[in-house]
């Protein structure tokens, strides 16, 4: 059950968080987080509001002091170094562009703090504005720019100082939906082009999956799982992660037979037991488990399957035709609903009707066994 | 049919306009009569001559022997410009008001900053503590400084008891005492608009500045102060303009050599009973203050418009 | 993080600067000696003297009366002015009205006082009213300058208020007058109260304007205090100061405490509703 897909094992560690905690007036916002950030990766902290992801980011940028633990960067603990002495820069959710300065002055602000020569500053500002395609707006004030343009300026400003680490706080939070999709890919392009390591915070799973190399799913101040978007989706390690990323159907079951090569699980709601084609290093004496199946991994048919395992019977309670695919809500005995997505790869009329009795089935590798 | 509806609509609209106009008219007429018209009268009387009568000034327009004559007397203004006393009084009023405003700003800005940075729970109490003195009596707060500053007052008594000085330092009835009094009395008026402005400041701008490598001092001068400029202007105007015309403070704390225009106006009016000269003094004071007042007005209106 | 420790130090020093003189006043009001600045033992006799000072008590009566009526008048006029400025935007002459609302906030008192006196004299000549000067003329003068303060307080509340509430009431068929009395007024009521209190204290405190427009028999408290203070320190004034400071402080903190209690009860209620 612990399928560790630790990526980037060959890369160098840029930063390491050890046992990092933060509490506000007795409320623990971040609990004992251990985390490694590798050089050159885009790392996303994903979770709902109040999960501690923003607090964690603010500790990396230096705006919050950890109550416990350390942040190791280049061999030193920088947990107590003030933000203006860290070689990290942040792109704020609201962009935080200085309203009394021009685009140019905003981008130059950080460079001026390093007492750079004026000619060098000018050159760097031009280079950055070119990178984000904002050269012709250099004399404008932030209130004369659109939301997307402001984001570009904010990005240019935070990259101008060549930070060792770029922090993004809800990078798409202030943009409308249509712009988001375009900007996500462009942002990744720019970050990869510059080659900067990046830690981002988002509540949007799609955004995290589009942009990040690795994702940490957070809840109640703890990191539940770290992995590539693929790992997190296909091999969630707990109910919360499975539920948070995408849609999932969950079954309660009891282990009937456990061998090193396979497992058989009895599920009362299904007509046939579940068969999984690999062993699980499950909870010792605990025979009760959760099984998760993604809606698109389930197949539907009007006739009973031939197999001995991995199928169930139900009634179509609701269906939504969405063009490229349809979503079905199947009512199992015991009032449990299962969601199924079927690609409409055929132009035939509706394959199934409401109230129709149908059979669900899936392959032995479709299921994931979860901890409670 | 359409014309009919239009007419009906217009009728309704004008009916709706009527109560609206009367609502506008009540405060409008009151302020016109009791705030604006008086200035016209002051201007008029500044061109009159003093005489022993009731009222103690001459009419500008007289009708005698079927002859309408208009007597505009520029004597008061000529008098004011030729007499050094008035000229230096204007200068020293402005100097005293400027210096006091500067000190109010230097003391008030960090105080307002500290209140805006305080935890939300204690912010209101701190603000209350700053405003509270201005709700008690102004006169009594100035009076308190007489006891503190006078030759056998608390400061001199304490210093002499400690053996720091042998003879009392003269502080009361000096310009120094006037500075202390103005700063003391007007400090809350400086802090209030500054605080209001700082609370509107987006804190992520301060964080962004720090994130980009600016030290707290740089952030203060490059980001916080420029972005609270509106509050600085409002606070300074709220202190400077009334301070120029201040009467009570120079009267109680200042000495005979403390020349302030408010005091001169008071003396011309109450002691010399020369209403026309007092009016001329007021007109010149207004002329000096009209620009700052308009600046303040414009700022206030901008604030109101931003809010709504 | 001691990032703003300098400003915090300034805050405490500033508060000491603001409160030390008042504290000294209070302490020495209990001084036995007539020499206010030399301590000669504890006594409350100056409070007794104060109560036997008929001139002063008369002035207190006058001041309270004027303050009450001025504050009430200023709330009516100031609220109307604020409403007009925030809701009827850009009518003819709105700029002038705005100017007449904000200018009194900074206008030197000697100018306001002199100009109003000259107005009253001119009106008496022209219309025969007001005959002589007294409580009425002080009331008019105070109402006028307090109107500006009330308009600012109420105006900021009005512009913060969610306008769609008023629009909803109008949409549901309420006439503009009904909307004002049934919707707007209850919502801005706290601002009206604080505006009234502000106007009340301003009127109570005014010396300069009242000195210009008062007549015989309408001496206010600040005028009595001023004529006494001009002659130097006096323990009776210290006693009076103590009473004023205690009164204002306890009123302010009582209302603050009450507001906080209401707020806390509201929060508790919210939490209970969310929990269930």
Image: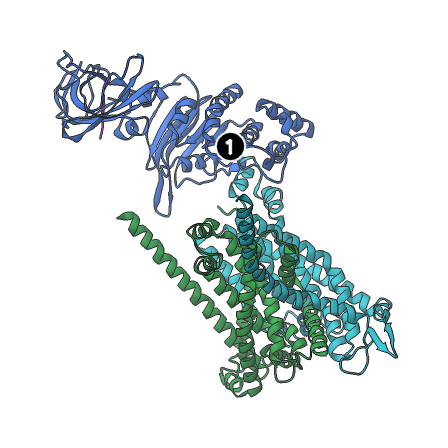
Chain colours: A blue, B cyan, C green
Of all residues, the one furthest to the front in this rendering is B1
Q: Which residues are magenta?
A: A366-371
Does residue A345 appear left or right of residue A151 in this picture? left
Identify the image quadrant of residue C205: bottom right
Residue at 14% x, 24% y: name it: A267
Q: Nearer the viewer, residue C147 or A61?
A: C147
**Image: B93 above or below A187:** below
Q: Residue furthest left?
A: A256
Task: Determine the chain carrying the residue at label 1.
Answer: A
Give residue A315's quadrant in the image: top left
Residue C14 visible in the displayed image? no
Residue sitting at 65 percent across and 68 percent down? B34
| B105 in relation to A316, above or below | below
The picture places residue A142, in percent across and down from the top left corner, at 59, 36
Secondary structure of the residue carrying numbered label 1: strand
Relative horizontal placement of residue B69, taking residue C44 as reference (left or right): right
> In this image, B243 relative to B5: left or right?
right
Q: Please state which of residues B254 and C54 is positioned toward the viewer in this rendering.
A: C54
The picture places residue A278, in percent across and down from the top left corner, at 20, 15
Magenta highlight on residue A367: yes
**Compared to C224, does A269 lie above or below?**
above
Taking depth in this image into account, of B26 and B223 the one nearest to the observer is B26
Q: Which residue is mark 1?
A: A91
Query: Which one is nearer the viewer's eye here, A222 or A46?
Result: A46
Task: Classify mark 1: residues with Cα within 10 Å, few (<14), some (14-19) or many (20+).
Answer: many
Q: Is residue C134 magenta?
A: no
Q: Could you tell me residue B254's position as x and y percent?
A: 70, 71
Q: How many marks?
A: 1
Q: Position of residue A300 (x, y in %)?
A: 22, 17
């Amino acid at each position: 059950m612990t399928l560790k897909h630790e990526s980037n094992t060959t890369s160098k560690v840029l930063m390491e968080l050890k046992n990092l905690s933060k509490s506000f007036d007795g409320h623990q916002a971040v609990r004992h987080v251990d985390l490694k950030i590798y050089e050159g990766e885009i790392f996303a902290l994903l979770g709902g509001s109040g999960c501690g992801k923003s607090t964690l980011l603010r500790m990396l940028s230096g705006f919050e002091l950890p109550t416990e633990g350390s942040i190791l960067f280049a061999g030193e603990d920088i947990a107590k170094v003030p933000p203006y002495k860290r070689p990290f820069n942040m792109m704020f959710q609201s962009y935080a562009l200085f309203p009394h300065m021009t685009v140019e002055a905003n981008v130059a602000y950080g460079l001026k703090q390093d007492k750079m020569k004026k000619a060098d500053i000018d050159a760097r500002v031009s280079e950055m504005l070119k990178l984000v395609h904002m050269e012709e707006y250099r004399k404008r004030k932030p209130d004369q720019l659109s939301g997307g343009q402001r984001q570009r300026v904010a990005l240019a400003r935070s990259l101008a100082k060549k930070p060792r680490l770029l922090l993004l706080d809800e990078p798409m939070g202030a943009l409308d939906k249509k712009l988001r999709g375009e900007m996500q890919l462009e942002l990744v392009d720019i970050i990869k082009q510059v080659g900067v390591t990046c830690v981002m915070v988002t509540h949007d799973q799609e955004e995290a999956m589009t942009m990040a190399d690795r994702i940490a799913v957070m809840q109640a101040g703890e990191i539940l799982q770290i992995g590539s978007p693929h790992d997190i989706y296909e091999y969630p390690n707990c109910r919360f992660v499975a539920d948070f990323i995408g849609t999932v159907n969950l079954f309660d079951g009891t282990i009937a037979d456990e061998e090193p090569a396979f497992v058989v699980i009895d599920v009362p709601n299904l007509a046939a037991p579940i068969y999984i084609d690999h062993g699980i290093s499950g909870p010792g004496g605990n025979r009760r488990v959760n099984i998760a199946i993604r809606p698109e991994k389930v197949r539907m048919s009007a006739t009973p399957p031939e197999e001995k395992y991995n199928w169930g019977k139900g009634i179509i309670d609701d269906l939504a035709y969405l063009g490229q695919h349809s979503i079905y809500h199947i009512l199992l005995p015991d009032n449990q609903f299962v969601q199924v997505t079927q690609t409409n790869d055929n132009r035939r009329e509706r394959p199934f009707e409401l109230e129709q009795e149908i059979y669900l089935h899936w392959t032995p590798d479709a299921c994931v066994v979860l901890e409670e | 049919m359409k014309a009919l509806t239009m007419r009906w609509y217009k009728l309704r609209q004008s009916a709706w306009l009527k109560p609206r106009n009367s609502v506008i008219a009540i405060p409008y007429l009151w302020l016109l009569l009791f705030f604006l018209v008086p200035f016209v009268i002051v201007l008029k009387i500044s061109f009159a001559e003093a005489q022993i009568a009731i009222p103690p000034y001459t009419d500008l327009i007289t009708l005698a022997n079927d002859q309408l004559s208009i007597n505009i007397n520029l004597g008061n203004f000529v008098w004011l410009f030729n007499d050094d006393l008035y000229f230096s009084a204007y200068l020293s009023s402005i100097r005293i008001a400027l210096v006091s405003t500067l000190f109010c700003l230097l003391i008030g800005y960090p105080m307002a900053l500290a209140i805006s940075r305080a935890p939300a729970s204690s912010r209101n109490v701190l603000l209350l503590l700053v405003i509270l003195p201005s709700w008690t009596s102004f006169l009594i707060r100035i009076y308190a400084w007489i006891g503190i500053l006078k030759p056998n007052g608390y400061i001199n008594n304490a210093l002499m008891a400690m053996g720091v000085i042998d003879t009392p330092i003269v502080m009361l009835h000096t310009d120094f005492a006037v500075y202390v009094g103005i700063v003391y009395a007007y400090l809350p008026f400086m802090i209030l608009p500054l605080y209001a402005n700082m609370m509107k400041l987006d804190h992520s701008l301060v964080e962004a500045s720090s994130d980009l490598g600016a030290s707290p001092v740089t952030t203060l001068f490059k980001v916080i102060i420029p972005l609270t400029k509106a509050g600085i202007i409002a606070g300074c105007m709220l202190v400077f303009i009334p301070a120029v015309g201040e009467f009570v403070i120079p009267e109680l704390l200042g000495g005979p050599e403390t020349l302030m225009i408010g005091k001169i106006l008071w003396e011309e009016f109450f002691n010399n009973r020369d209403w026309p000269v007092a009016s001329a003094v007021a007109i010149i004071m207004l002329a000096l203050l009209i620009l700052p007042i308009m600046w303040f007005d414009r700022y206030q209106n901008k604030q109101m418009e931003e809010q709504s | 993080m001691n990032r703003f420790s300098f400003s915090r130090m300034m805050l405490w020093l500033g508060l000491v600067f603001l409160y030390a003189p008042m504290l000294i006043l209070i302490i020495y009001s209990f001084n036995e000696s007539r020499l206010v600045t030399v301590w000669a033992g504890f006594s409350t006799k100056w409070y007794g003297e104060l109560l036997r000072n008929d001139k002063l008590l008369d002035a207190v009566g006058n001041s309270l009366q004027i303050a009450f009526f001025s504050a009430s008048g200023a709330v009516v006029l100031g609220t109307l002015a604020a409403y007009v400025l925030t809701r009827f935007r850009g009518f003819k002459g709105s700029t002038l009205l705005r100017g007449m609302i904000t200018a009194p906030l900074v206008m030197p008192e000697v100018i306001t006082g002199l100009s109003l006196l000259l107005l009253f004299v001119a009106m008496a000549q022209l219309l025969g009213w007001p005959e002589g000067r007294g409580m009425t003329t002080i009331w008019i003068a105070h109402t006028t300058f307090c109107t500006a303060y009330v308009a600012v307080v109420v105006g900021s509340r009005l512009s913060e208020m969610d306008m769609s509430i008023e629009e909803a009431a109008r949409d549901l068929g309420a006439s503009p007058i009904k909307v004002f009395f049934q919707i707007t007024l209850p919502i801005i009521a706290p601002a009206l109260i604080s505006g009234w209190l502000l106007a009340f204290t301003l009127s109570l405190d005014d010396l300069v304007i009242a000195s210009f427009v008062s007549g015989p028999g309408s001496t206010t408290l600040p005028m009595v205090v001023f004529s006494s203070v001009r002659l130097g320190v006096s323990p009776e004034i210290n006693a009076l100061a103590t009473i004023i400071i205690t009164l204002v402080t306890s009123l302010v903190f009582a209302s603050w405490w009450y507001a906080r209690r209401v707020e806390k009860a509201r929060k508790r209620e919210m939490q209970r509703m969310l929990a269930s």
